[in-house]
Image (tube, coloured by chain):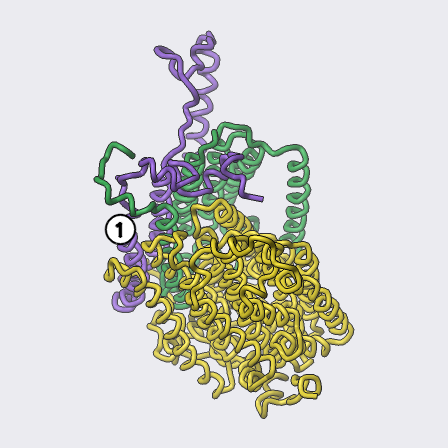
């Protein structure tokens, strides 16, 4: 059996297993819908508002940094594979690549972008100076929110 | 089992020497960041370091500039992915000058304003240098992968720079529009690149253009259209122009200056290089691709220029007007680029010279106009032209200088813009009927553009100053009194007169255009080159030869311009400017 | 191209490849449709993940293992997370209906049809050259080969990619950074 065939069979059996079980379950399980079952908490307090909160922008920076190193990984992997063939040349050509990224990382560390706990974020004067909102420094969020008041200066 | 791999060797010293400008910019970025960390508490250090980088870059360009000219060739280095020729090097010189002027302008604009925290200055400098690196590579790119990477290197910092005033809604909106349109354009361009690779089996621009010689396949045509869509975005050519005014308005003036001069300049140079390849390849054949290119690029240029001028007339804010004016100016240059697509006309070198000349003039007049517009709107507290009524009485020097730049953008004789447009028209006029049509478009557009270039001057000079205007003036921010911005403007005015009165400008620039378009491969002295070339490149053979030996490629050009910088006098309208 | 491939590989494995191809193609195509038609942005992200994963599967079938892995790591793993984070960061409730209106839908449909016809004509009319339709077990798809190419022919692109990553880091850091001024007040953890 070729690897390709086993992969195909694996995929088909895996897909079929899920589908068959879901179909069987549909016929076997009792059916008793109730509005409470669809609520967020089936027991306890009635929920207030939505379950949606706006996350801090710092999470986005974590995601961006993750992506940066993700792409770096994708590029550095073929480099690492040929490293054994030509250690000297690969080292010389790879050092600038790694060095540039390292410098950027060190700079971000130094400049405080990576500090997770920041003081003074919700200080009143900050909120005043930061007229978008106390949550995000970027106007993008306000734009996405389509708040007519804060967007009044956009023609 | 381990298979064979292509040979890898280190770059040669010659190659490193020829990419010195790019190396300087990269090292400059690193030094700016390290300097910011080392000189804590002195926020001016990274800005000064960035300026030093720009000056060092100019020196580096100067060192590499004349070397290819002596050999009379373009050097294809790094496995023919980069082309170093006088044309690209001259643009890089303009680019470095732009960075320097923009940084000086920035010092005049931002001192004492809290748009940008001092702790953010190194970020600003680093992004500016990074964008410049991308544009510099774009001017030399000879390979689709390098085009893509360079375009991203130029675009990504521009996105951030457009929104650098992150506490302003307008900046955020500009940045978002820029990113969204840029992402769509890049996506289309990458898709086009993949189609082109599929159609030609090569990533090299000349091989791709050469593939059209066997007849244009639909897949090649679609790929080419998508590729040019990406170029059109950087050029802000008309279907993809609408980010330009919004970004220029949302970004600070210095960033707008940088984008309007450097970004468009790089795109024009890339377009010129691409279209020139068409011209070189369509020589021996019927020139089907070259003809399509001439029509396509010419029409795009004409539409861009006309649309930019028409919409500029309706603007009431000086910055939006300048933005649309820059769209129209880019349109003029695109129209001239179209002239490169016809081989055998023998005027490719002339067209290159005309484009370089126009870029030089454009640099001076646009930097000057933006600098003064920034100062005057900072002083009057508004960018509405009507609020600048009577400013001639308050700031006569600035208004006169602004007038010089605006009239040069229009093309008044004795100013640089006139001679630049004259050269463009001469080049276009050589193209037969299509060329005459382009010249007429240029002429009509130029006359029409006078209407809106005079508009701010009308308000500033002829309108009376409003009552209580003095109070407004004193309320202006501190930055409008700094002499730094005025210095930039005076330097630019000198540049406009230098080019306009042709005090050696044409003869200085001409050699750089004339030696473009002829190729010599910088062989690395590696015999296995042929082995590694055959891998993805079916026409590696022809790539390894100097292009003068390539069948049909730029043969006529080499013959024609190896001697003196021939058709002399053809470019110089001496009868007009020296009656 | 695939049919060509099936012929070269041989009939014993040919049908397996064909089945897998249609599986992945259906996955990509159907979830791309669902992506466009879904009104819920989170579901759109999930459909996008399926589309990208299907494309990765096709890369695998074509023998471009590195490309497939990169597709999974960077797009399915990275870009998609970025999109979901972007949704989480907007203060607007993402469960709102973002389905396109009728007019937009019609315009999009027309544009997409034109593009699809154009591309179909282009691809069907052109026989792709040999270089683009290499056999999957070709040496040049090996990771070592690509690594060597990155260090030789595409050295400039490789090194400048690091500059792009540096720029992205600086830009991201700049946009997210807050005023340092506030730091002089005593740091208290509970506030954020």
**In percent of the image, x 38 and y 45: which residue is there?**
C73
Chain identifier, green in the render: C
The quadrant in which the N terminus of chain B is found is bottom left
Answer with left or right where residue C27 lies relative to residue B532. right
**In percent of the image, x 65 and y 36: which residue is there?**
C105
Would residue C133 be seen by someone viewing this image from the given angle? no
Chain identifier, purple in the render: A
Residue B446 at x, y percent in the picture: 70, 68
Relative depth, front residue between B201 and B174: B174
**In percent of the image, x 72 and y 79: which residue is there?**
B430
Residue occupying the far front of the picture: B467
Would residue C102 be seen by someone viewing this image from the given angle? yes
The shade of chain B is yellow
- Establish if C138 lies above or below A130: below
The number of numbered badges drawn on the structure is 1
Residue B303 at x, y percent in the picture: 70, 61
Residue B494 at x, y percent in the picture: 53, 78
Relative depth, front residue between B301 and B254: B254
């Amino acid at each position: 059996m070729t690897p390709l065939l086993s992969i195909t069979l694996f995929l088909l059996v895996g897909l079929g297993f899920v589908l068959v079980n879901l179909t069987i379950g549909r016929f076997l399980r009792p059916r008793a819908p109730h509005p409470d079952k669809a609520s967020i908490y089936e027991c306890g307090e009635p929920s207030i508002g939505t379950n949606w909160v706006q996350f801090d922008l710092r999470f986005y920076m974590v995601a961006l940094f993750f992506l940066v190193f993700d792409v770096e990984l994708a590029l550095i992997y073929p480099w690492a594979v040929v490293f054994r063939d030509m250690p000297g040349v690969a080292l010389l050509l790879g050092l600038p690549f790694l060095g540039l990224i390292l410098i950027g990382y060190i700079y971000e560390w130094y400049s405080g972008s990576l500090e997770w706990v920041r003081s003074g974020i919700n200080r009143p004067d900050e909120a005043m100076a930061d007229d978008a909102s106390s949550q995000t420094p970027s106007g993008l969020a306000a734009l996405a929110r389509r708040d007519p008041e804060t967007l009044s200066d956009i023609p | 089992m381990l298979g064979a791999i292509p040979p890898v060797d280190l770059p040669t010293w010659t190659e490193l020497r020829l990419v010195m400008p790019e190396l300087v910019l990269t090292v400059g970025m690193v030094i700016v960041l390290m300097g910011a960390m080392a000189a804590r508490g002195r926020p001016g250090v990274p800005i000064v370091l960035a300026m030093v980088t720009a000056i060092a870059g100019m020196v580096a360009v100067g060192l590499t500039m004349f070397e290819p000219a002596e050999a009379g060739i373009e050097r294809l280095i790094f496995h023919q992915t980069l082309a170093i020729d006088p044309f690209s090097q001259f643009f890089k010189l303009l680019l470095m000058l732009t960075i320097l002027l923009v940084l000086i302008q920035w010092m005049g604009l931002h001192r004492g304003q809290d748009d940008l925290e001092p702790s953010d200055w190194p970020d600003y400098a680093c992004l500016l240098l990074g964008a410049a690196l991308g544009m510099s590579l774009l001017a030399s790119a000879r390979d689709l992968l390098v085009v893509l990477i360079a375009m991203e290197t130029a675009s990504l910092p521009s996105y951030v720079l457009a929104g650098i005033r992150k506490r302003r809604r307008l900046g955020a909106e500009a940045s978002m529009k820029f990113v969204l349109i840029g992402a769509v354009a890049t996506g289309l361009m990458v898709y086009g690149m993949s189609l082109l690779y599929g159609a030609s089996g090569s990533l090299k621009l000349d091989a791709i253009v050469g593939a059209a010689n066997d007849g244009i396949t639909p897949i090649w045509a679609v790929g080419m259209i998508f590729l040019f869509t990406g170029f059109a975005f950087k050029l802000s050519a008309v279907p993809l122009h609408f980010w330009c005014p919004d970004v220029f308005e949302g970004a600070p003036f210095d960033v707008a200056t940088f984008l309007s001069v450097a970004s468009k300049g790089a795109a024009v140079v890339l377009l010129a290089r691409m279209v020139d390849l068409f011209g070189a390849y369509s020589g021996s054949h019927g020139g089907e691709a070259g003809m399509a290119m001439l029509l396509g690029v010419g029409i795009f240029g004409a539409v861009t220029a006309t649309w930019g001028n028409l919409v500029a007339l309706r603007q009431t804010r000086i910055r939006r007007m300048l933005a649309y004016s820059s769209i129209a100016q880019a349109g003029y240059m695109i129209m001239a680029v179209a002239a490169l697509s016809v081989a055998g006309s023998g005027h490719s070198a002339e067209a290159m010279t005309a484009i370089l000349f126009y870029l030089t003039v454009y640099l001076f007049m646009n930097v000057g106009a933006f600098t003064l517009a920034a100062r005057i709107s900072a002083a009057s507290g508004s960018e509405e032209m009507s609020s600048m009524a009577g400013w001639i009485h308050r700031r006569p020097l600035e208004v006169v200088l602004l007038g010089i730049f605006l009239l040069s953008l229009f093309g008044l004789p004795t100013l640089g813009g006139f001679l630049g447009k004259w050269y463009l028209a001469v080049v276009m006029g050589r193209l037969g009927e299509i060329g005459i049509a382009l010249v007429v478009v240029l002429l009509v557009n130029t006359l029409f553009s006078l209407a809106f270039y005079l508009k701010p001057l009308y308000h500033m000079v002829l309108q009376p100053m409003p009552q209580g205007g003095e109070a407004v003036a004193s309320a202006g921010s501190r930055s409008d009194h700094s002499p730094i911005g005025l210095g930039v403007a005076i330097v630019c005015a000198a540049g406009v007169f230098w080019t306009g009165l042709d005090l050696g400008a044409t003869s200085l620039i001409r050699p750089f255009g004339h030696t473009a378009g002829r190729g010599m491969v910088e062989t690395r002295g590696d015999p296995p080159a042929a082995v590694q070339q055959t891998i993805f490149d079916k026409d590696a053979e022809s790539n390894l030869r100097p292009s003068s030996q390539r069948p049909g490629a730029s043969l006529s050009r080499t013959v024609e311009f190896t001697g003196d910088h021939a058709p002399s006098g053809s470019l110089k309208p001496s009868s007009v400017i020296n009656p | 191209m695939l049919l060509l491939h099936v012929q070269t590989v041989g009939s014993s494995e040919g049908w397996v490849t064909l089945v897998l191809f249609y599986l992945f193609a259906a996955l990509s195509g159907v979830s791309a449709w669902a992506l466009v038609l879904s009104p819920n942005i989170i579901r759109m992200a999930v459909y996008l993940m399926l589309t990208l994963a299907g494309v990765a599967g096709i890369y695998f079938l074509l023998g471009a293992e590195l490309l497939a892995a990169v597709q999974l790591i960077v797009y399915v793993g990275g870009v998609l997370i970025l999109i979901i984070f972007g949704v989480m960061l907007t203060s607007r409730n993402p469960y709102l209906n973002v389905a396109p209106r009728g007019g937009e839908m019609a315009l999009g449909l027309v544009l997409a049809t034109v593009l699809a016809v154009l591309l179909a004509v282009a691809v069907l009319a052109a026989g792709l050259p040999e270089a683009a339709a290499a056999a999957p077990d070709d040496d040049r798809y090996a990771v070592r080969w690509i690594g060597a190419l990155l260090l030789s022919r595409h050295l400039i692109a490789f090194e400048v990619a690091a500059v792009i990553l540096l720029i992205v880091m600086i830009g991201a850091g700049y946009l997210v950074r807050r005023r340092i001024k506030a730091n002089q007040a005593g740091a208290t953890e509970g506030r954020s």
